Image: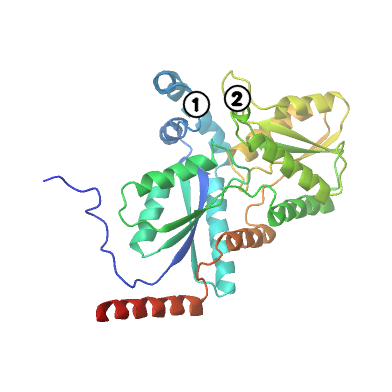
Amino acid sequence: MLKSAFNTEPPFSHGQASRTAVLLCNLGTPDEPTAPAVRRYLAEFLGDHRVVEIPRLVWMAILHGIILRVRPAKSAAKYATIWTDEGSPLKIWTDKQAQALQEVFNTHGEHVTVRYAMRYGNPSIASQLDALKAEGFTRILILPAYPQYSGTTTASVFDAVYHWGLRSRVLPEFRFINHYHDHPSYIQALAERVRAHWAEHGQADRLVMSFHGVPERTLHLGDPYHCECYKTARLLGEALGLNKSQYMVTFQSRFGKAKWLEPYTEPTLIALAQQGVKRVDLICPGFTSDCLETLEEISQEAQEAYLHAGGEVFHYIPCLNDSQTWVQGMHALCQSHMGGWPMLENDAKQLQISRHEALALGAKD
């Protein structure tokens, strides 16, 4: 007898009360700053066809034959410079964001449960969806931690959800937030983060907005990421009252020899220093949580490059993390995508009564 892929599912309960959850999905992180842990993480991350769009057989030979033999030790050393007693900064901040968002829902009397998951690493999206389904959640909003949509990030999160669904007979009702690069709450949170920094340190000669880079070919293939980064930058500049000469957009984290979105962050900072720009503030609007790319690549490496080239003052402005404005912004964002879903206790009770009435009528017929 063939074994069904659905045999392990919990039994479906007619008249089951509706339960709503938000799953905050971030990129991921190694479990610890060691070469073996980084190797496991990179194998999953770089093995995703959304991340690297080279023909599969060719890329797998390069990945396992070269990259995973050399890069893990180097990356582990970088992770070690930002690791804390609590663990990975990205995981810490994502966890805090989820907890803070849960508190806002609770304060509003909304019956919504918030969990977080990682696209690569732990806790995985699949494991969190398993847990939510086992607990009886029937509606799940997927909230990626990526404000700007990209096939390399946002779509990969959705892939993981779809893949999980392939082995589930009774699926929850899903909704997906594609992007929020121009959402007023997100722009407001960024602007307040910059203003708070300026209030403490003064305003620099130039504000650099550094976004994570992707290969340039993704732009030509129709990925909206490049355009959404520039719209975020324009809206943030307007919110801060800056003219176009006072801020600029760059792209960081280039990997491999292919041409990526330009201008590149570190060469731009070096050029600014050489041009006599003495003070630079840098913010990474594409990251909602501080991580390796912000704390090591920007706050350490990029700062050193700028100062070595003749710059005098470099300030990295931290990500939104669990700032109150951003947590409230996430709540507003979720609410805008959860219209029609019962969240208040009376709504849930009324829905449950309606279901029982429908079942009773069905039994009479």
Residue that lies at the very extreme toward the left in this rendered image: 1
Q: CA distance from mark 1 to mark 2?
A: 10 Å
> According to the image, label 1 marks what residue?
53
Figure coloring = rainbow
Residue 237 visible in image: yes
Residue 352 in the image: x percent, y percent?
40, 77
Q: Secondary structure at mark 1?
A: loop
Q: Residue at x 83, y 33 (%)?
A: 312
Badge 2 amino acid: Arg
Q: Residues within 10 Å of mark 2 (few under 14, many from 20)?
A: few
Q: Do tag 1 and tag 2 residues touch (Cβ < 8 Å)?
A: yes
Q: Residues within 10 Å of mark 1 (few under 14, many from 20)?
A: some
Q: Which residue is nearer to you in this view: 87 or 242?
A: 242
Q: Quadrant of residue 134?
A: bottom left
Residue 162 in the image: x percent, y percent?
41, 46
Residue 336's place in the image compared with 34, above or below, is below
Q: Residue at x 59, y 73 (%)?
A: 108
Q: Residue at x 43, y 25 (%)?
A: 68
Q: Secondary structure at mark 2?
A: helix
> According to the image, label 2 marks what residue?
217
Residue 85 visible in image: no
Horizontal side of residue 209 vs 153, given as left or right: right
Dot 1 or dot 2: first in sequence order is: 1
Horizontal side of residue 294 vs 87, given as left or right: right
- Quarter of the image where the C terminus is located: bottom left
Q: Which residue is nearer to you in this view: 247 or 91?
A: 247
Badge 1 amino acid: Glu
Residue 196 in the image: x percent, y percent?
78, 54
